[in-house]
Image (tube, rainbow, N blue to C red):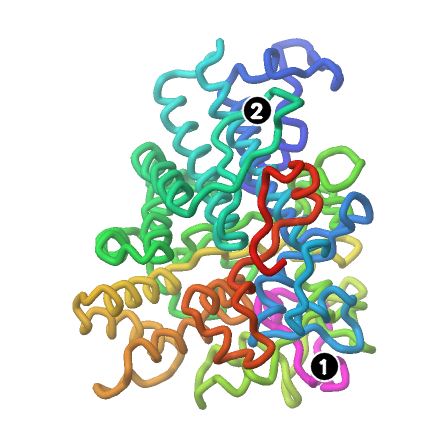
Amino acid sequence: MKKYMILASILFLFSCGEKELNLLPLDRVTTDSFYKTRGDFDGALFASYSSIQDFWGISAETLGENGEFWKISVVITDDAAADTELADGVSQDIDLLQIRSSDVPYGAVYSQIYEGIYRANLVLTNLDSENELTEADKTILEAEAKFLRAWFHFQALKLFGTPPLALEINTDLNNLALPNASQDELYASILDDFATAAAGLPEDWGSADRGRATAWAAKSYIGKVNVWKEDWPAAITALADVVENGPYMLMPNYADNFNYDTENNMESIFEIQFGGPFSDDNIWVFDDTHSENFKASQGSTRSYHWGAANGAPGGKRGWFIPSQDLVDAYEPGDVRAEETYYEDGDMYYVWSNQMTQELPYNPEWSSNGLSGKKYLGEYNAVGANRSPNEAADFNNERWFRFAELKLLYAEALIEGGGDQAIAKQQIDDIRVRAGLPILTPDRDLTEAMRQEKRIELALEPHRWFDITRWGIGPDIFGSAWSENYNVFPFPLTEIDRSDGLLKQNPGY
């Protein structure tokens, strides 16, 4: 899929005849002239996927993004911190639970989510226009567009609680704002869209389209959404189907989930595809957040924000670092520790000056003597995973892994009164891969599941949403916690644009 996502940047603006190339001027492309062929619709869908790439982007224009989604999904948690000497002020404030509706992260992710929804809705709106699609094409395209629309709405629900539900293209320029939706409305729409996706998508796209959503990914999300909804019977049914009948497996080697050369593997349910070598991979100009021409296949800014700094080779920022609290949470012998963070005594790897550099890690490279290693490390410090300017990574973001699904299945069984032996087996499977013994019979399964989920998914964008839905904020953050933190504020700019139609979350 990577090589196809580049074409989303121009939405297949050209067509090639047998003897001549006919170019359509950029200022003459309209929905009436564009949405005709299967390639047109594929390109439009890839544009919706590309909105997800923006979550971690950098831009000097519009909102001035700097890896914003990491700040509100990882840095804010007990697993990570903003480096007190290197990180920007917003990162440091968020690390201290200072949450303001005027801060960039909330406006950035809100814009990117609804951009993605809008692009998916464009596809759905034009399916029944005059075009060359077969009925089979329409079934698949509707399913994929609804998968994306559901995915974006689910992220909005997790972040903001009662965000707008955008199910059509509003063409009235005087009436563009949407009100808050209720959680019941959101869950119903999200699950309905995922059900359409599960029924209409292929189980596998083949290597040329690797990374596109599949029927099994949609079924997996039906299970996950029902966990959030606390509909335990529905969650158990959906997740059991994926575990027992789906195509996924735990990779024998934990590190293979984060290595550049093992992307889109059998543990990956939904994976964000990044760049290289088919684009210019300019991490400074992400998608529609900059005035330069639209590009859909940049690299990720992960190494730039998470790589060691403060004198470390490679010239990284080092803004975001693992917390000592996370390090202390690992059990002795857990192999996941050495794949997640660098500490004193480790060998550090970085691609710098067009070569892999290997040298002892210096704890002075961060304010707490720790640096991120997940998605980095030896196997990712290679030229194939770096842009020519060495700032961008091409390593995909594994958003939803089978390991997470197994732990969600365990949670549903525990909370829903299902077979506790099966729940324990899901947790044990994760532990055995990590080099740890299986749980003892007297171990509390809820505590074990939550501990395993934290460690298995450390520094991935899940911990904050577990903290809020489990209601454990006061246990982790003590007096710094406020109940309004269970949802983020709607961006002040969106409140203003809606002329009060969109209501702010309480406490902000």
Mark 1: few/some/many CA within 10 Å (<14, 14-19, 20+): few
Give the extent of the magenta segment.
356-381
Quarter the C terminus occupies = bottom right
Point out residue 281 in the picture as x, y percentages from the top left corner: 72, 46
Point out residue 80 in the picture as x, y percentages from the top left corner: 61, 74
Q: In this view of the protein, can residue 288 be seen by the observer? A: yes
Q: On the image, which quarter does residue 361 sit in?
A: bottom right
Q: Give above or below for 141 relative to 447.
A: above
Residue drawn at x 60%, y 84% as measured from the top left: 324
Amino acid under disc 1: Leu
Whichever of callouts 2 and 1 sits on the residue coming sooner in the sequence is: 2
Question: Which numbered circle lies on residue 255?
Answer: none
Cα–Cα span, label 2 and label 1 = 56 Å
Q: Give above or below for 249 relative to 454.
A: above
Q: Give above or below for 237 relative to 140.
A: below
Q: Is residue 242 left or right of residue 476?
A: left
Point out residue 366 in the picture as x, y percentages from the top left corner: 74, 80
Q: Secondary structure at mark 1?
A: strand
Amino acid under disc 2: Asn
Q: Is residue 406 left or right of residue 374?
A: left
Residue drawn at x 72%, y 13% as measured from the top left: 28
Question: Which numbered circle lies on residue 170?
Answer: 2
Report if residue 436 lies within the magenta region: no
Question: Which numbered circle lies on residue 359?
Answer: 1
Point out residue 205 in the picture as x, y percentages from the top left corner: 40, 38
